[in-house]
Image (cartoon, coloured by chain):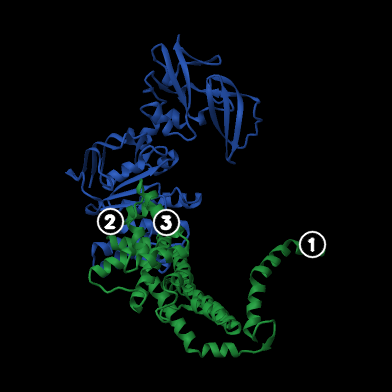
Amino acid sequence: MSLTLQNVTKKAGAATHISDVSIELASGSLNVLLGPTLAGKTTLMRLMAGLEAPTSGRVLFDGKDVTGVPVQKRNVAMVYQQFINYPSLSVYENIASPLRVAGLAKAEIDTRVREAAALLRLEPMFGRTPLELSGGQQQRTALARALVKRAPLVLLDEPLANLDYKLREELREELPKIFSASGAVLVYATTEPSEALQLGGNTATLDRGRMTQFGRTIDVYRRPVDRITAETFSDPPMNFVSAEIGAGVARLPGDVVLPCRGPLSGLPDGPVTLGFRPNHLHLRRTDGDTASVHAKVAVVEITGSESFIHVRHPGGDWIALTHGVHELKPGSPVELYLDPHHMFVFGADDRLVAAPKPTAAAA
Amino acid sequence: MDKPFNNRAWFLVLPVFALVAFSAILPLMTVVNYSVQDTFGSNVFFWAGTDWYVQLLNSERFHQALGRQLMFSAIVLIIQIPLGVVIALCMPRKGWGVPVCLVLMALPLLIPWNVVGTIWQVFGRGDIGLLGYTLNRMGFSYNYVNDVGDAWLTIIAMDVWHWTSLVVLLAYAGLRSIPEAYYHAAQIDGASRWSVFRLIQLPKMKHVLIIAVLLRFMDSFMIYTEPFVLTGGGPGNSTTFLSIDLVKLALGQFDLGPAAAMSIVYFLVILLLSWVFYTVMTNDPDRQGGAA
C-alpha cells in the first residue's frame, strides 16, 4: 500500500493549517514528520487518516482517490500522545475492540489479540483496566490496538512524548520492528530531531503548515535545503551568523576570519549566512579549527555528560555543546574555536548553497 | 531523644472543635435529648426512654410517609438522571450556544424554592394557570388540589423542571473533560454512537454522575418547601413527605418527643441510604473480577 498526497491544502476560516503538501509514502516505509509544535503535524496526519477532508488537493491510497472518504471506511490505525484506551474495558477487550467492531470471528480475534499482546509484552495485563496500568503499559495497549487491526496505514502522533525517558528509549527501539512486519505505511510525528535520527527511515520537515523537505532522514540532516529546515532539524538549535565572502576568506562580525575551505571554497564573493551545529563550536582547539572567537558566557546548562554553553557574540547568540561538565561563570569571557569544514552556507534567499561533506560532518 | 511536645498545638484546633460543637454536635444532642423525654412545655421533662422510637417505628403514619418519600425520590432519580445525561449530550461543545445553554440551564437553580412552588401552583390552576387551563380545555380533567395522581404529577414535573439542570451541568462538566482524541480514536475504530456513549462517555462521566445521584437523592429525600407551597401535603396526606410530616408533628401537634425521635430516624435513614448508594456505585464488580 502506498499513500500519496497531491497538493493538499487545509484551511480553517482565514488560517491555513496545511499549505500545498505533496508527498508519496511507500509501502513498508517508516516516515517521520518532524516539526515544532503547531507546525501542522497532527493536522497532516488527520488528513492522511481521513478524519478531516482537505480544502483542496487529493489523497490517494494505492493510486485510488480516497479524498473525502471518511475514516470509518478506510483501514487506518492511529496512536496519540495521550494514552487513549476505553476506560471501562480490560486490556484484552481494549485490544480486541477494533476487531469486534469489524465483526471478526471469535477465534480469529483471540489469535490476533494474543499475537499483538505478545509483541508488546502485555499478556500479564489482560485482566486489568487501563487505569490500573502504568503510563508505558497504557501506551503499549494503545499501540497493540493499532497493531491488531493490521491497517495498511499506521499513524503515530508523538506516541512517546508523555512517557518518561527510559520507557521512551525502550519503546522507540521496538516500535519500527513491531510495525515493520506488517508492511504498513508507518507515519511518526515528533518534535525532536534526535528521535527522527534514531528512528531513521525518511523524514519530512514541516514548518507552519508547509513541508520544507522530504527525503532519507540522514540526507535531510546532512543537507537541509534551507535555513528553516536546518533550524527544525537541529537540537539544540543551529547557530547562525551572517558573513561576507571576499578575497578567499569569510569575514564574520567581531573580527572573526575564516579561510574559505571545505564548503566555503569556490563561493562567489558577497554576503551569506553561515550555520554550524552547537557541537561544532569548540571550547578547545582541535585539528582544523582555524578561527578563534571571543564571546561572553550567558548561561551554562549542565546535563552531566554534556554542557550547553550559551554565549553572546557580536554575530549573535550561540550555543556550544561540549562533553563533560564545564563550570563557567555567566558574564565571563570565553574563547571558542570554529572549523570552516563544518559550515552550512545559506544564500540571501536562505536556501542551502553548500553543506559540510558527510565525512567531515561525521568526524 | 524525646520528641518535643507542644501543648499549645491544641489551641490551634480549638476553633474547629468549637465550631463543630456549636454547629453540629450540640444541636444534634438537643434533639437526642428531646427524643428520649416527654414534655408538655414550661420546661417540665419526663423520662421516656426508647418509647418514642418504638412508637414511631410501629406507626402506620410514619411507614406511609417513608413509603411516599422513597417512591418520590426513586421516581425523581429515574427521570432526572437519564434526562440530565441526554440533555448534556445534546448540548453544543463549542461556539455561542455554550453560554446560552449554560445560562438557560442555570436559571431554574437560581429561583428560590418557595417561588418555584408558587410558580407551579399558579401554573397548574384550572381557572387562571396556563398548564391547568390548557389541559382542561384539551379535555383532560386535571386538578392537583383534589386528585392524588395529578398532585403527584405536578410535584414531580416541578422537581424535574427545578433540578434536572443540576444533573445536566454536572454531566456536561464530565463530558467536557474528555479529550477530543478519544472521539477520534473511536471514529478510527469505526465505533457506533452507542458504543462511544457506553465505552467512553459513560465511564468518563461516572464520577460526576455518582455525585449527581447522591446530591439529587439527598435533596429529594429532604424536599419540603415546594410541595408545602403547592399542595400543603394534600389532597389528604397523599403528598405528605417525611419533612412535611415532621413539621406537622413538631409544630402542628407540638409533639416534641416523637418529632425529635423522627428527626433522628430520618437523619439515619438518609445517612444509610447515601452510604448504600455510594458503596454500590463506587464498587465496580467487573474491575474486581478482572484484577483477581
Q: Chain of mark 2?
A: A
Considering depth in this image, is B249 or A304 the residue closer to the camera? B249
B226 left or right of A68 in image: right
Q: Identify the residue position indicated by label 3 in the image.
A: B107
Asked if badge 3 and badge 1 are on a common chain, one would say yes
Looking at the picture, how far across and down is residue B266, in whole percent?
53, 79
**Residue type beneath disc 1:** Arg
- Residue at 43% in and 38% down: A193
Q: Chain of mark 3?
A: B
> Count the marks: how many?
3
Above-or-below relation of A362 to A348:
below
Chain depicted in blue: A
Tell me whether the residue at label 2 lies in contact with that at label 1, contact meaning CB atoms closer than 8 angstroms: no
Above-or-below relation of A215 to A138:
above
Colour assignment, chain B: green
Looking at the picture, how far across and down is residue A24, in whole percent?
25, 39
Question: In which quarter of the view is residue B136 placed?
Answer: bottom left
From the image, state whether disc 2 or disc 3 is nearer to you: 3
Q: Identify the residue position indicated by label 2 in the image.
A: A150
* Mark 3 or mark 1, earlier in chain: 1
Question: In which quarter of the view is residue A128 placed?
Answer: bottom left
Q: Residue furthest top?
A: A247
CA neighbours of label 2 inside 10 A, class few (<14), some (14 to 19), many (20+): some
Q: Residue furthest left?
A: A64
Considering depth in this image, is B202 or A341 the residue closer to the camera? B202
- Residue at 45% in and 25% down: A275
Distance in Å between CA atoms under marks 2 and 1: 69 Å
Q: Which secondary structure lies at badge 1?
A: loop
**Residue type beneath disc 2:** Arg
- Residue at 36% in and 35% down: A205
